[in-house]
Amino acid sequence: MADTTTLSATRPSSLSSPSPVSPLSDAAGRLAAATRTSRGAVRLAELPFLAQLNVRLDAKGAAADAVGLALDLQLPLAPNTVVRAGELVVLWLGPDEWLLVGPPGSERELESRIRDAAGGEPVSVTDVSAQRTTLLVSGPRARDLLAHGCPLDLHPRAFGAGRCAQTTLGRTQVVVVARDEPRAGFWVLVRSSFAGYLTGWLLDAATEYMA
C-alpha cells in the first residue's frame, strides 16, 4: 500500500486547493466605481469570508453565561440588538438564537471555544460562513439608499447603532445591521446565491446619487 503521508507531502503545488473566491469578486470594480462616482454619498463594498456561526442555547441557562465569558462578551438578550467586543459581533436572531460574526478564518476556533464553554449543557453551533456574504453600505445617503427597498423604518430613532433585523431588501431576504457609529453605515448579510442580484439592485438604486 502506498505511503499516503509521503504522497501528500510531495504533491505538486499545482494540485493544491484553489484560493476561495467570494460571491461578489466579479462585482468589486462596479462597487468601487459607484463609490467614486457618488463622491462619497454612498460607499459600497463586499466584506468577504467573515466567519459566521449560528448559535442556539437556552438564554436563561448556565451555557449562556459560560459562552459569554468564553467570548468575552454578553450575548444580547433584547430583541434585534447587537453586542460587539473587539473583532466579534453577536446578533440577536431570536429568544434562543444568535449569529456570531468574526474575522475570516476564525470559525473553527470560535466553535471550539463555544462548545468547550458549554460543557455538558445543550448547545447548537452551526458554521454558516459559506451561506452568506456581507455588503457594507455606508455614506451620508446610505439610509436613503436602503429605504428604497427595505420595509423597516431606518430612521436613527427607530434603527440606530447597535440594532439588527431580519428583513427584506429589494425583495431579498437579508439581515441588516446598523454599525456602532453612524458614519460606519450598515452591514447587509445576504445569501451567497442572491448576492449578485442584490448588488445589481443596490447599484441601480444608487444611480440617483451619482455625479
Image: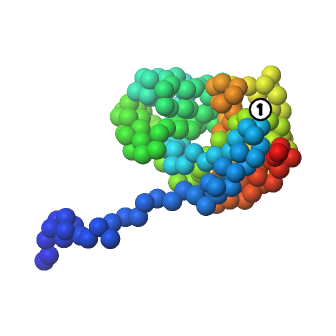
User: Does residue 192 show up?
Assistant: no
Q: Residue furthest bottom?
A: 1
Looking at the image, which residue is at 54% across and 56% down?
22
Q: Quadrant of residue 5?
A: bottom left
The quarter in which the C terminus is drawn is top right
The quarter in which the N terminus is drawn is bottom left
- Of the residues shown, which amino acid type is indicated by label 1? Pro
User: Does residue 153 show up?
Assistant: yes
Which percent across, then down, holds residue 82?
62, 28
Which percent across, then down, holds residue 20?
46, 59
Taking 8 as reference, is 124 left or right? right
Q: Relative to 6, does residue 189 appear above or below in the rendering? A: above
Report which residue position mark 1 lands on: 140
Q: Quadrant of residue 44?
A: top right
Taking 151 as reference, is 102 left or right? left
In front here: 171 or 135? Answer: 135
Looking at the image, which residue is at 86% across and 46% down?
208
Taking 186 as reference, is 146 left or right? right
Badge 1 marks a residue whose secondary structure is: loop
Which percent across, then down, holds residue 72?
44, 23
Which percent across, then down, holds residue 146?
79, 41
Q: How is the image coloured?
A: rainbow
Looking at the image, which residue is at 77% across and 43% down?
38
